[in-house]
């Protein structure tokens, strides 16, 4: 079973195209506030992540996801079923 | 910090809009003259943004029925059907809408918004999953949230994405409600219903179609996209509104599942709302009869839609979908869309200005909704007003040369 430690680098790779040049992604990076994503870009990021990990992230859980770490933990939880 | 601080960004956005001299989201219709005309800012204005698809709001049969009910049954019901009891006319309206759809079960709600809240929240609760189209109306989002089900969005009209998500659910797909719309209200495009029905059957899910903008418009008898696609038997539930093609207010849900009838006992938006006014119920019953007996209204709507569509395309506009009664002219920027909207109103044409976040894909739209009641002359006037707008410079040169201020001043 894939763990959070395995998920994190894949998550960084997936998020990289959505960051500005030289921006260094960290676990504590705030997805909306720091990456400056608008609602449309958030949708695109989520679609990409969902396809990469073959999961569907429920809308109900989105309010709890603020940082890269939150997102990684959500992915881990969904992969565990 | 105060409770009201969260309104500051909205206040700023509103003040920005007011600088242009008019607030497109707070238009006052001083006097309504007909289904297609009103006095706005002292000027006779053609209405092409009111969803009055069949133009029935002034139909003499609907007015007479409403007047008689008002005199005989009073102005309101003063409470909910569960507490105060149903009027016989509520039952008659449910019978009429059930017969129209050929479905055994129908429930009427006080508004279309509440129909979605009431049906969706009752059908899908804790432990269930909802797969909803990403471009769904706010009432669908709210109805899904109210029930407590897990909500998953799929890409708008993308059946492959829907199927992928059904597969990911595994066994849970049997307790999944797929929610789509017949015609989507912003761009006017339709759900690929035949393909959606196929995957719904393959994964054993349940399907509900919101026919708010397609009732009275699509299908041989005007029952909507499910009828037009020939899949009514495979659609589990339909929700809709009386407030568009039927020209009144209220909403409904219909189904062939006997359990649907039990929604009355579990649906909070049904239980805790005053039931529809008798005059509204009577007018709605009249307009249901009209759409059943006057298919030529639908024909006229399509003739008008074709006329307007061709005119807008010839004028250089990019529209959001194929020919239909909803047309969305895509405008490159918010400022330009606002300026164009205002110029149209000054020229006596009322359309809807639609800007993000209410629109799909962050588009800025001038949205038009055609009516069977529009005359040929009115359609031509609408086309001329659009053709005269200075958007064409931008479309043809693909540069940002159009200055919105130049239109506004």
Image: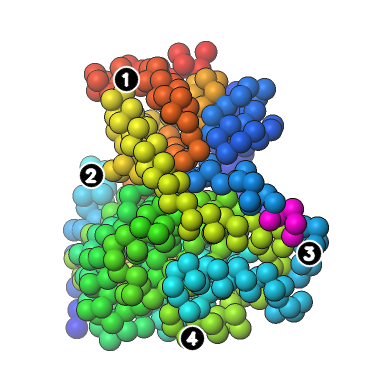
Q: Chain letter of disc 2?
A: A
Q: Chain of mark 4?
A: B
Q: Quadrant of residue B198?
A: bottom left
| B83 lies left or right of B371 | right
The residue marked by circle 1 belongs to what chain? B
Q: Which residue is mark 2?
A: A22
Task: Report if the CB atoms under discs 4 and 2 are less than 8 Å apart.
Answer: no
The residue beneath circle 3 is B73
Q: Nearer the viewer, mark 1 or mark 4?
A: 4
Depth check, mark 4 against mark 2: the one in front is 4
The structure residue drawn at horizontal position 53% and vertical position 43%, both measured from the top left corner, is B55
How many other residues sit within 10 Å of disc 3, few (<14), some (14-19) or many (≥20)? some
Residue at x 34% of width, y 29% of height: B312
Highlighted magenta segment, given as a residue range:
B65-69
Q: Residue at x 49, y 24 (%)?
A: B344
Label 1: how many Cα within 10 Å (few below 14, some 14–19, many 20+): some
Q: Which residue is mark 1?
A: B392
| Mark found first going from the N terminus, 1 or 4 | 4
Residue B239 is at least partly visible in this image:
yes
Q: Furthest residue to the front? A: B293
Q: Nearer the viewer, residue B66 or B231?
A: B66
Q: Secondary structure at mark 4?
A: helix
Distance CA(mark 3)–CA(mark 2): 71 Å
């Amino acid at each position: 079973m894939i763990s959070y430690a395995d998920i994190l680098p894949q998550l960084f790779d997936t998020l990289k195209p959505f960051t500005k040049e030289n921006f260094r992604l960290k676990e504590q990076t705030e997805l909306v506030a720091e990456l400056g994503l608008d609602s449309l870009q958030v949708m695109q990021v989520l679609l990409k992540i969902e396809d990469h990990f073959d999961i569907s992230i429920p809308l109900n859980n989105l309010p709890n996801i603020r940082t890269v770490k939150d997102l990684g933990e959500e992915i881990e939880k969904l992969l565990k079923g | 910090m105060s409770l009201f601080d969260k309104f500051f960004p909205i206040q700023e956005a509103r003040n920005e809009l007011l600088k242009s001299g008019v607030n497109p989201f707070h238009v006052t219709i001083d006097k309504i003259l007909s289904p297609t005309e009103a006095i706005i800012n002292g000027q006779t204005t053609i209405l092409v943004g009111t969803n009055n698809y069949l133009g029935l709001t002034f139909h003499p049969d609907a007015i007479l029925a409403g007047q008689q009910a008002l005199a005989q049954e009073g102005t309101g019901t003063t409470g909910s059907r569960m507490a105060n009891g149903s009027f016989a006319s509520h039952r008659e309206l449910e019978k009429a809408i059930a017969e129209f759809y050929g479905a055994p079960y129908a429930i009427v709600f006080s508004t279309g918004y509440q129909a979605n809240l009431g049906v969706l929240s009752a059908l899908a609760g804790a432990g269930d999953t909802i797969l909803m189209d990403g471009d769904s109306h706010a009432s669908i989002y709210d109805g899904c949230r109210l029930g407590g089900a897990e909500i998953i969005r799929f890409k708008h009209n993308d059946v492959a994405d829907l199927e992928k998500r059904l597969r990911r659910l595994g066994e849970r797909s049997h307790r999944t409600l797929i929610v789509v719309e017949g015609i989507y209200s912003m761009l006017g495009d339709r759900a690929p219903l035949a393909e959606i029905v196929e995957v719904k059957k393959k994964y054993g899910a349940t399907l509900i179609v919101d026919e708010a903008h397609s009732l009275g418009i699509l299908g041989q008898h005007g029952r909507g996209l499910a009828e037009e696609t020939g899949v009514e038997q495979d659609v589990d539930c339909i929700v809709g509104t009386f407030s568009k093609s039927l020209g009144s207010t209220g909403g409904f849900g219909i189904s062939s599942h006997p359990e649907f009838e039990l929604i009355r006992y579990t649906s909070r938006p049904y239980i805790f709302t005053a039931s529809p006014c008798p005059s509204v119920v009577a007018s709605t019953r009249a307009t249901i009869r009209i759409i059943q007996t006057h298919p030529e209204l639908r024909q006229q709507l399509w003739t008008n839609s074709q006329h307007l569509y061709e005119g807008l395309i010839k004028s250089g506009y990019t529209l959001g979908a194929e020919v239909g009664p909803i047309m969305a002219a895509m405008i490159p920027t918010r400022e330009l869309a606002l300026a164009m909207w205002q110029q149209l109103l000054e020229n006596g044409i009322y359309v809807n200005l639609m800007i993000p976040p209410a629109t799909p894909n962050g588009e800025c739209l001038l949205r038009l909704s055609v009516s069977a009641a529009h005359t040929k002359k009115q359609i031509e006037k609408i086309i001329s007003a659009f053709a005269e707008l200075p958007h064409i410079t931008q479309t043809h040169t693909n540069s940002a040369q159009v200055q919105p201020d130049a239109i506004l001043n």
